[in-house]
Amino acid sequence: MMRETPWVAPPGLEGVVVADTAISDVDGAGGRLTYRGQPIGDVVRNFRFEELVPWLVDGVRRPNVQPLVLSLPLEPWPRDPMAALAVILLHLGDTWPDDLDEGCAMICGLPVMFGRVVGTDGDSVWDSTAGVAEQYLTLITGKKPASVQVRALDAYWVMAAEHSLNASTFAVRIAASTGARLPLALAAGVAVLSGPLHGGAPEGVLELLDAVAERSDCPEAILEEKLQRGERLMGFGHRVYRSVDPRAQALREVFLDLVGTEPWADLAVRTEQAALRLLAERHPERVLATNVEFYAAAVFKAVGIPRLLCPPTFALARMAGWTAHWSEQHREGRLIRPLARFRTS
Ligand code: ACO
């Protein structure tokens, strides 16, 4: 009997819909992002990270989420911070609560647990009654942060919490479809996010900003040199957003509130403007706008998050979206099991 040839998805699954979701919607052509039907700008204004996590999971707002922080053994943790985050999740697997509300409280406590593992000497000024963003910054930088820095990190976390079906979220949904428990599914998300094509862009933007800062007279010349060498300007362009990235716009406001008067903030803004100008000249056929990573990197620099901790700081935010997708996929109750086509070379 002839074997039936199944439909073959395009490489990278581009243009293929593999899930229904009520969690978020990315409108690439219109440059809009909504969480549970609300525009991202409104969500950032109305939610702190601790409030966002359970709301993203089921759409019900709880005002007083108490982060759950468990003690972790002192050492040894992997030196790579993303690996350390994954190992923390695996370690917590034994005690992770099955109740989803408590699971959300654990997600809110994770930045504190992670901060205690990778942080500097923040323990001396750490205030365990403060909000999670404040506790995290204290543990990471070793200093009590200014309230404007705390608000900026909180806004970034809310904005980075969810972005529909990207690679890491898909990985978490696949894990959920097998019945994997939440902490192990989240560790799968961290592993996928550790790749430079997914969670690594802020580091590239920071390198760009540092290069520009060294020759602060003229960002345009440095950008031009990069383009001449065929390099891409990190923090510009997006696979899905074809007009604007709404997160970049919202985070730009946060950044300007935070350090708007400092000289390097002015330099970052001039760099953005010069890059947009050069990219428009080179690619009049398409819009290459500022993406969220440009201002994420600028906010990280302004609040004192070191370069190595940019990816895990992003991952800590994305735990919220992953948890919502894990829960949604669990309810779906269908194992994700695609096929592969065999070929000999
Ligand atoms: N700098 C310079 N040129 C660019 C850039 C950029 N940032 N982005 C796209 N282009 C150019 C490409 O060189 C290409 O030119 P060509 O046709 O002359 O070869 C053209 O625009 C189309 O490029 P594609 O790769 O097809 O565009 P796509 O939309 O698929 O790429 C991507 C999106 C990968 C994000 C790209 O814009 C890029 O590499 N940006 C820089 C890296 C970056 O900022 N990544 C973070 C993305 S946001 C996020 O992940 C949350």
Image (tube, rainbow, N blue to C red):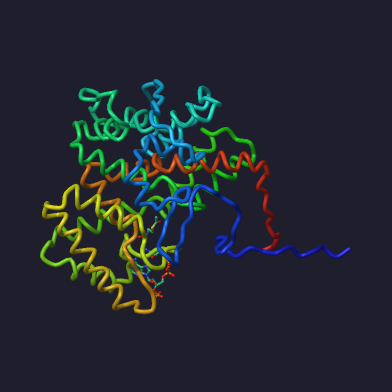
Q: Which residue is drawn at 69% across and 60% down?
A: 341
Q: Where is residue 208 in the image (x, y as percent from the top left)?
A: 24, 59
Task: Work out which quarter of the rendered image holds the N terminus and state it.
Answer: bottom right
Q: Residue furthest right?
A: 1
* Residue 172 vertical position relative to residue 223 in the rendered view, above or below: above
Ligand 1 located in image quadrant: bottom left
Q: Position of residue 149 (x, y in %)?
A: 22, 41
Q: Where is residue 30 in the image (x, y as percent from the top left)?
A: 42, 65
Q: Residue at x 32, y 57 (%)?
A: 248
Q: Which is nearer the eye, 5 or 303? A: 303
Q: Which residue is drawn at 76% across and 65% down?
A: 5
* Residue 239 vertical position relative to residue 43 in the rendered view, above or below: below
Q: How many labels does the image show?
A: 0
* Residue 55 vertical position relative to residue 28 in the rendered view, above or below: above
Q: In this view, does 221 lie to the left or right of 74?
A: left
Q: In this view, does 291 lie to the left or right of 182?
A: left
Q: Which is nearer the eye, 195 or 255? A: 255
